[in-house]
Image: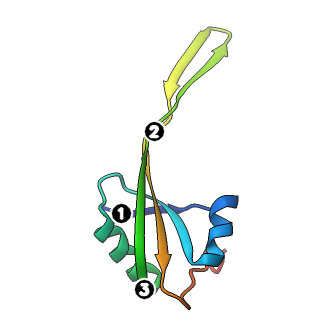
Amino acid sequence: MNILKKPLVTEKISEQNEQGKYGFVVDRRANKLQIRDAVEKMYGVTVDRVWTMNYQGKAKSRYTKSGVISGKSPNFKKAIIKVADGDIIDFYSNV
C-alpha cells in the first residue's frame, strides 16, 4: 500500500509551511502511525503531530448534447504533518 499519494501545494498549506506544517493526500485506509512512518522514511524528518481529515467526493453534473451526465469525484483523505523544529520538507527539490 502506497501511503503518501501526493503533497498538497495550496495557498493555505504554503502559509503553514513556515510553521513546520505540511499537507499530503494519503491512502484512505492509512492510520496516523503509518502516515508518520512513511513521511519520516521518505523525507528524513522527525514528525511531531499528524492530523487527518476524510473528505466525501462531490456530486458533479455536466450538460451535453446527449443529455445530462452525472457522476461523483472520488473520496479522499488528507493529512497535515507537523515536523520537529529545524526540519523542513522541500517539495520543489526534484522539479
| Mark 1 / mark 3, whichever is N-terminal | 1
Relative to 80, is 89 above or below? Answer: below
How packed mark 1 is, by other alpha carbons closer than 10 Å (few <14, some 14-19, many 20 or more), is few
Residue 74, numbered label: 2
Secondary structure found at label 2 = loop
Q: Quadrant of residue 68?
A: top right
User: Can you tell which quarter of the image residue 8 is in?
Assistant: bottom right
Residue sitting at 43 percent across and 47 percent down?
Answer: 76
Query: Disc 1 versus disc 3: distance between alpha carbons?
Result: 20 Å
Quadrant of the rendering where the N terminus is positioned: bottom left
Q: Residue at x 49, y 75 (%)?
A: 82
**Callout 3 crowding tier (Cα within 10 Å): few <14, some 14–19, many ≥20:** some
CB under 8 Å between discs 1 and 3 = no
* Mark 2–mark 1 distance (CA, rounded to whole Å): 17 Å
Q: Residue 60: x percent and y percent?
A: 56, 26
Q: Which mark is residue 36?
A: none
- Give residue 57's position: percent from left, percent from top: 47, 36
- The residue wearing badge 1 is 2
Q: Pinpoint residue 87: horizontal percent, then vertical percent.
A: 54, 88
- Few, some or many C-alpha atoms within 10 Å of disc 2 (few <14, some 14-19, many ≥20)? few
Amino acid marked by disc 2: Pro
The label on residue 46 is 3
Task: Give the amino acid at mark 3.
Answer: Thr
- Residue 75 drawn at (x, y percent): 43, 41
Q: Nearer the viewer, mark 3 or mark 2?
A: 3
Residue at image location 56% in from the left, 16% down from the top = 69
Drawn side of residue 6 relative to residue 17, left or right: left
Q: Is residue 90 above or below residue 63?
A: below
